């Protein structure tokens, strides 16, 4: 009888522990199943990303971008990215088709123009250009001033706030999913605009790294559910202590 009672008590204890683990996990990463309003659970996650990003001063990552321009999906580009707040950006293309290309932008310096050069034999010419000029924006959806985690988080929040206010968002999934070998939470949101409102994308699939609480994967689809932008960040290193020389054209490792 005593043995049976001990077995029952042990079973109850295991159940309580399991429930506690589930409750803690739901608090950190709220799920669709446990949320009264899935979109509000996503908004809570956005706030966590904002809080995490607020503690970041600088970072380095391998940035992959792929965009559709004039209906054509361009080849994926692989870029070494250095970023420091408030807005210092260095980018070096480390993979084809633009290998060797470099771009540098420091807010408030060089008349707020970027400096850059192409890879290969064209790399001997360094240009100083407006970030939104026709040359710099060719085959690019965004200027260099919109690269990085901060812009992604801000734009996701902006779209989410409007969609929540008007009931124009559907969360298809919010769950754990590995991304590029790291634990992440994936959020798939679909926007259904009415009354002439517009959102940046009709469908967004965003992967948030569980350790960094930052959006390391972003795939955006148009109203025909065709991919028009995809950005990923791997080998992310936060607060590495980047210096002025990391954002200087006189860095001996750069070719400006």
Image: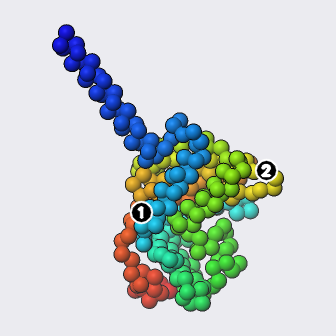
Q: Position of residue 208 (x, y in %)?
A: 49, 53
Q: Quadrant of the N terminus?
A: top left
Q: Nearer the viewer, residue 140 or 207?
A: 207
| Residue 45, above or below 88 | above
| Residue 52, above or below 17 | below
Q: Residue furthest right?
A: 195
Q: Position of residue 56 (x, y in %)?
A: 43, 68
**SS at mark 1?**
strand
**SS at mark 2?**
loop
Q: Crowding at label 2, few (<14), some or many (≥20) Cα neighbours within 10 Å?
A: few
Compute the Cα span from label 2 to label 1: 38 Å
Q: Is residue 78 left or right of residue 71?
A: left
Q: Which mark is on residue 100?
A: none
The residue wearing badge 1 is: 236
Residue 46 seen in the current view: yes
Residue 220 seen in the current view: no
- Front tag of 2 and 1: 2
Q: Residue at x 23, y 15 (%)?
A: 5
Q: Residue furthest left?
A: 2
Q: How is the image coloured?
A: rainbow
Q: Position of residue 152 (x, y in %)?
A: 57, 62
Q: Residue at x 44, y 89 (%)?
A: 250
Decide which of tag 2 and tag 1 comes sooner along the chain: 2
| Residue 102, above or below 72 | below
Q: Crowding at label 1, few (<14), some or many (≥20) Cα neighbours within 10 Å?
A: few
The residue wearing badge 2 is: 194
């Amino acid at each position: 009888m005593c043995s049976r009672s001990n077995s029952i008590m042990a079973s109850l204890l295991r159940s309580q522990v399991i429930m506690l683990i589930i409750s803690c996990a739901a608090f950190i990463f709220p799920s669709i199943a446990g949320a009264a309003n899935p979109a509000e659970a996503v908004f809570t996650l956005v706030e966590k990303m904002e809080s995490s990003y607020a503690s970041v001063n600088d970072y380095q990552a391998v940035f992959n971008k792929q965009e559709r321009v004039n209906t054509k999906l361009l080849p994926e580009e692989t870029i070494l990215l250095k970023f420091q707040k408030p807005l210092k950006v260095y980018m070096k293309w480390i993979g084809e088709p633009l290998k060797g290309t470099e771009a540098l932008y420091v807010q408030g310096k060089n008349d707020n123009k970027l400096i850059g050069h192409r890879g290969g034999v064209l790399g001997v010419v360094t240009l100083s250009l407006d970030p939104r000029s026709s040359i710099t924006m060719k085959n690019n959806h965004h200027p260099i001033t919109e690269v990085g985690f901060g812009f992604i988080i801000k734009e996701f929040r902006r779209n989410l706030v409007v969609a929540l206010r008007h009931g124009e968002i559907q969360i298809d999934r919010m769950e754990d999913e590995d991304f590029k070998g790291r634990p992440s939470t994936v959020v798939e949101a679909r926007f259904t605009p009415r009354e002439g409102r517009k959102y940046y994308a009709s469908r967004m699939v965003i992967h948030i790294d569980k350790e960094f609480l930052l959006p390391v994967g972003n795939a955006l689809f148009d109203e025909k559910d065709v991919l028009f932008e995809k950005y990923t960040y791997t080998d992310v290193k936060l607060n590495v202590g980047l210096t002025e020389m990391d954002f200087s054209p006189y860095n001996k490792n750069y070719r400006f």
